[in-house]
Image (tube, rainbow, N blue to C red):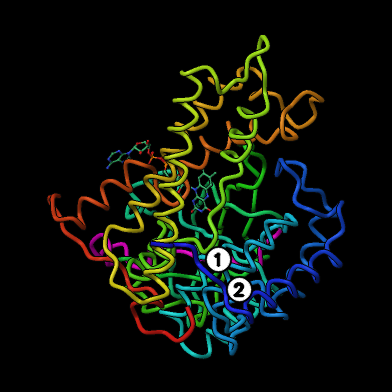
Amino acid sequence: MDFKYRYTKEQEEFRQEVRAWLETNIPENMKAPVDRLDLTEEHYRFWREMHQTLAAKGWLYPTYPKEYGGGGLSGEHETIILEEFERVRVVPDFTNTYIFSTLLVWATEEQKQKFLAPILKSEKVAFQNFTEPNAGSDLASLQSRAVRDGDDWIITGQKTFISGHGDPDYLFGPIVTDTDAPRHRNLGYFMIPCPSPGLELSRLNLLTGHDQSFIFMDNVRVPGDHLIGGELEGWQVTQTTLEIEHGGRGVASPRDEAMENLLKFVKETRRNGEKLGDDPIIQQQTMTAYIESHINELFAQRNYWMYQARQEMTYHGSQSACFRKSFRIRNADRARNIMGMYSLLGVDEPRAPFGGQPEVYQRSSLTGAHPGGTIEIQKVIMSRRLGISRTRERAAATPSTAGVQGV
Ligand SMILES: Cc1cc2nc3c(=O)[nH]c(=O)nc-3n(C[C@H](O)[C@H](O)[C@H](O)COP(=O)(O)OP(=O)(O)OC[C@H]3O[C@@H](n4cnc5c(N)ncnc54)[C@H](O)[C@@H]3O)c2cc1C
């Protein structure tokens, strides 16, 4: 049986249109640098504008509803666009995209126009404001507090590891609204405007760069219409964000550049006159890496297909996240074994293979195990959903399962 996907004539023409436009409009010096640390202020300014142009063409968020600034296109179009974006190294939008599904499911019509539309058009940028110093894996232990003041809320507390480059327009996430209520029933979900008096961002310095921040909130005033969902419904709203972050939307076009480079390295490198792949141990390690990389792609594509087809999902998102996070660490180990010291040469080293990408991978495979829940937490979620845990749970509502038009 032939499993190859065949695009229609219209889709192939669309690909040519996207490719030609990108080749004309993305200058070589503005392409995404190999190391995110090398993203300059000039890159940032160029891409803030370019993202708005791409959004206006319907290519930045192809499948989201047109009425809110999305492209109104199909999953096949999204796949084509992402493949073409990767060819010319488009810098991804600076917003945290998990907010889209959250607003589509939980926001009122006015809130969708107010928050979702400008973010989908890339005019505004939002960061995910969840983790606190004492609430990471155990997110329900949040302590940041929102107190009613007339129609407004006054928020005080601290968040940490909040990802995002540049300055956000909103910070979205759960805050305690009722200290007397039990866990999971004591939260509201807020779009906190930035900048705001009393709000401060302080950059962290992690292995992969400076794109994470501490957030300090000292009596920050937030208007009442910035609360998404009911004032004690924040946990459910949060679960929609996390469902997508855990992999519940899948990936239209998963690509593993590290694996492509490793394969190329083994094919093209000779040691002591012998091809690297002639060594049976290197051959075994490379093929194990290749198989795991392919399994990861299949999980991501399966979830994307299930999501687009509005199929009921349970453990699938976390299964994909768990595998992705763990195989990347294993493949980074394998790349070190196979490439040796070359895998540790950074982008500035003339002898670094593939412009230093393998070294960036060594670092990002480690930090990548944390955002959205660690490997262990993905297993906890899977076991709850497969019915082998003390507690049982179902998947949270997403635009796919909640019947929202445009996903
Ligand atoms: C690069 C990066 C980007 C991030 N971006 C964001 C962001 O944009 N927004 C945001 O809100 N947060 C963000 N985070 C934070 C991230 O969500 C947390 O780091 C993560 O949830 C883990 O929390 P923690 O670091 O407090 O670790 P802890 O919760 O303290 O966990 C420590 C260790 O204990 C293990 N553990 C904890 N509980 C259990 C359990 N029940 N069973 C088994 N093992 C367990 C964990 O797996 C981990 O290995 C980011 C983190 C990183 C590193």
- In percent of width and height, residue 342 lies at 67, 21
Q: Which residue is mark 1?
A: 97
Check if residue 169 falls in the magenta segment.
Answer: yes
> Residue at the spot x=56%, y=70% of the render?
221
Q: Which residue is mark 2?
A: 61
- In percent of width and height, residue 40 lies at 81, 48
Asked if labels 2 and 1 touch by Cβ distance under 8 angstroms, the answer is: yes
The residue at the far top in this view is 272
Ligand 1 shown in quarter: top left
Q: Which residues are magenta?
A: 167-185
> Residue at the spot x=43%, y=48% of the render?
296
Above or below, 179 relative to 398: above
Identify which amino acid the numbered label 1 is placed on: Thr
Would residue 404 appear left or right of 258 to someone viewing this image?
left
72 and 145: which is toward the camera: 72
11 and 200: which is toward the camera: 11
> Residue at the spot x=26%, y=47% of the render?
380
